[in-house]
Every structure is written in C-alpha cells, then in structure tokens.
Image: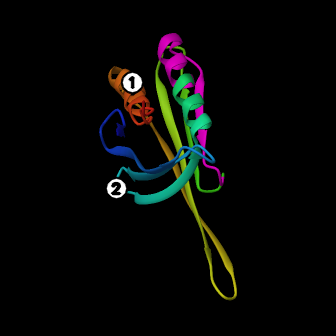
Amino acid sequence: MEVASEGKDARLTVEVTEGEFIEYPSLNLLVTVSDEGFCEARSYAWVTLKDYKDFVAALRQCEQTRRGHATLSGMSPSELELVVESSDKMGHFCLRYRLGKTSFTSRTVQAKAVMGGFDLDVELFDQTVSGFADLLPVPET
C-alpha cells in the first residue's frame, strides 16, 4: 500500500513480506519512503500483530472523528515508527516516520536512521486507512 503527500512529492509504501501467526503473531514489513527528492530509504521491521491491529483501529477512529493520532512502532523501536496525527482542527492529517537500522562490525555498532514527515492528502485519507487495513492477513478457516 502507498501513502502519498498532498502534493504527491513524497510517498511511503508498506508491504507485508512475511508473517508469524502461531508462536508470536507478528508481521515483517518492508517500509520504503521517498520524500521530496531529498531522501529515499527502505527498511524491514517486525511488528506484533496486536500492535498493527491497534494501529489500524486508531486510524479508523481518526477517520471517524477527524482528529487524534495512531502510532505503529517496530518490535525493535529503533527500526520503525509511523505516526499519523491530526495537524489542525480542520481534519487534516500528517504522517511522521522514522526508519532505522543497526549495523554491527567487528569493532563498532552503527545506528542509522532516516526521519521526516509530510501532510497527507485529506481527500484520500479514507484510502490510506483502508490501505493499512487491507494489509492485515485474513485468518485461515
């Protein structure tokens, strides 16, 4: 799924690359961001299924009330943080992101991160919410 800025010059995409549903229900997400030509980054992050469902529920609440916020953090918080929050009393929303990675070498540990944000297209906010919701796996029967 893709989330675009109001002017379409920044975008964030999220894909589910794998899931674990038995021992520790969780999703592995590939998150890619392109922000106004300034940066392009991609990162993998595991999130618990419960946290993802809570994020979608909070997004739906934001959609209904046109205010509030929804936060999704990775199981390793330094790897992923997405925040969708109201930016004014008119029902507009913005998305803030932080993608991170820790690299280990024989001598050092290097933490790297890209962060930023952009205003969401208010006319497409319902599609943003449904896009995140559609990523939830359908339980097998």
Residue 53, image x, y percentages = 55, 31
Q: Which residues are magenta?
A: 58-76
Question: Is 63 on the left-hand or right-hand side of 36?
Answer: right
Residue 111, image x, y percentages = 64, 68
SS of the residue under disc 2: loop
SS of the residue under disc 1: helix
Q: Nearer the viewer, mark 2 or mark 1?
A: 1
Identify the image quadrant of the C terminus. Answer: top left
Q: Which mark is residue 125?
A: 1
Q: Residue at x 49, y 32 (%)?
A: 94
The answer to whether residue 36 of the structure is visible from this angle is yes
Which kind of residue does numbered mark 1 sit on?
Phe
Mark nearer the N terminus (2 vs 1) = 2
Q: Is residue 41 above or below residue 109?
A: above
The residue wearing badge 2 is 37
Question: Is 53 on the left-hand or right-hand side of 16?
Answer: right
Residue 17, image x, y percentages = 41, 52
User: Looking at this rendering, what residue extends furthest in the bottom direction?
Assistant: 106
Q: Residue at x 66, y 88 (%)?
A: 106
